Image: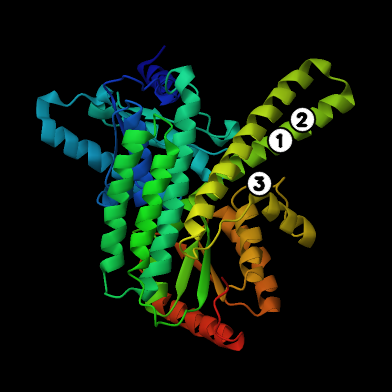
Amino acid sequence: MTEKNAKKVINFQSLTEKVGRFDISGSQAMFLIPEMNRIGGHLLAATFRGFGIRSRVIGTYKGLDLGKEHTSGKECYPCQITTGDILYFLKKEKERLGKDFLPQNYIYFMPEAGGPCRFGMYNKYQRIVLDSFPEFRHVKIGSLTTSDGYSLDGLINPERVSGLRKAGYLSIVVTDVLERLLWRIRPYEIKPGITDEFIEKSMHIMEACFERYGAQQRFDKIIDRLESLIEEGKSLIKPDLPRKPLIGIVGEIYLRHHVHANQDLIRLLEHYGAEVVNASLAEWVNYTSYDRLREAKTAFRFSLKQMHLNSLKAHLKDILKYGGDLLYQQQKQKQVYKRAEKLIDIQPDHKVGHLEEILKENDIYSFDAGTEACLSISGIIQYAREGFNGVVNVYPFTCMPSTITSAIIKPLMNELRIPYLDTPYDGSFQPGREAAIRTFMYQAIQHFNRNGGKPSH
């Protein structure tokens, strides 16, 4: 075998041996979580720490030049950002520790999705990039996948997997509630900047709660503390301010949550007179469980029709597994929102099964086609039904699911006379961006006024 061919084999082996699920329970390795959503990343890291897993959120956007240097530009924008994030972090760690830097002591967390979305290739590509640096070749990439509903099997001891999954899911729901609290308060805050300070403080308080109570499954303690923060947050609202036009956000999950990547879009919309609600993190997790359940039911019906009795048992097992996951997620989410909504009128989350029914009613798209377009298209229609005054679709430039969403939804929004705006991002600052948002908000305010200037919730 030539040296050139040997290198190819080694690289291929790297993709299979250094990308995947690694047992991180009791490991000395540091689990590195990219910052897509600031609150969500910190609460998830705290949850892992509660289970004895060394974990931290790595900083973001400081290594963007590195990310662009080691990508071609044909990748999704989030791939450039996260590639830069991990390279920047590792380089700084090597500078800080010097000879004590041990690459095998780090596991970089980069999940994946199935289907045509390029997200499924991030960790493979980043593996190749890390292998191009001799000092980073032994950094592993830990991955979960939508193909099994983000199962945590293999990460920790089997008897603790269920507890980690439940605590991790709760951290996502609490993240969504804290963010909805932020968006509900900030447009009406009694003092500029006070809401951001309060939410930052709240994030650290909830971090401590998840680290202390998550592994013990003492979820009531966590929710009780969340309630007390909501009570405190209510006092930051200036009571005599009238409600503002309500704007919904859909699109690619990373871009719509990463404030640097979307150039702080929500704050800009608020600046021009909006109250904003972003699609939740939990919506995507619920969708993956829901979609795996759909697939299991379809496979069961096919096997029954073909009389493939040997496979029926396996499909039935999947139905019970994913059905149980989805039921737990929906019940826990409902419990948290119910307690929060007793204290403040935050926007409730969409139920994934209802979103599929919306697509069936209109016969405009199908969950069989998959991707985030399923959630974005139906989510926009649901926003319209709930009385929102405008919708923004946030996505990486050239993103296929969001381009599909735009093509399908624009004619519908024109018919409904509800303002709609596409906001693709690639890291550049577009000179007409702010003008487009100002025009969109003018239209949203007109829609708000035409409908009596009343809030939808």
Mark 3 or mark 1, which has the lower sequence index?
1
Q: Which residue is more in the foreground, 257 or 428?
A: 257
Q: In which quarter of the view is residue 387 placed? A: bottom right
Q: Residue 186, labelled with which disc?
A: none
The secondary element bearing badge 1 is classed as: helix
- As displayed, is residue 83 above or below residue 186? above
Contact between labelled residues 3 and 2, with CB atoms less than 8 Å apart = no
- As displayed, is residue 364 above or below residue 28? below
Kind of residue sitting beneath label 3: Gly
Q: From mark 2 to mark 3, how far is it between C-alphas? A: 16 Å
Q: Residues within 10 Å of mark 2 (few under 14, many from 20)?
A: some
Q: Residue furthest top?
A: 1
Residue 299's x, y, as percent?
A: 77, 30
**Residue beneath label 2, please?**
299
Which residue is rendered at x = 67% and y = 34% of the image?
Answer: 323
Residue 17's x, y, as percent?
A: 42, 20
Q: Residues within 10 Å of mark 3 (few under 14, many from 20)?
A: some
Mark 2 or mark 3, which has the lower sequence index?
2
Q: Residue 295, labelled with which disc?
A: 1
Q: Residues within 10 Å of mark 1 (few under 14, many from 20)?
A: some
The secondary element bearing badge 3 is classed as: loop
**Residue beneath label 3, please?**
370
Q: Which residue is more in the foreground, 168 or 335?
A: 335
Label count reads 3
Q: From mark 2 to mark 1, how far is it between C-alphas? A: 6 Å
- As displayed, is residue 414 above or below residue 152? below
Q: In which quarter of the view is residue 426 placed? A: bottom left
Contact between labelled residues 1 and 2, with CB atoms less than 8 Å apart = yes
Q: From mark 3 to mark 1, how far is it between C-alphas? A: 11 Å
Kind of residue sitting beneath label 2: Ala
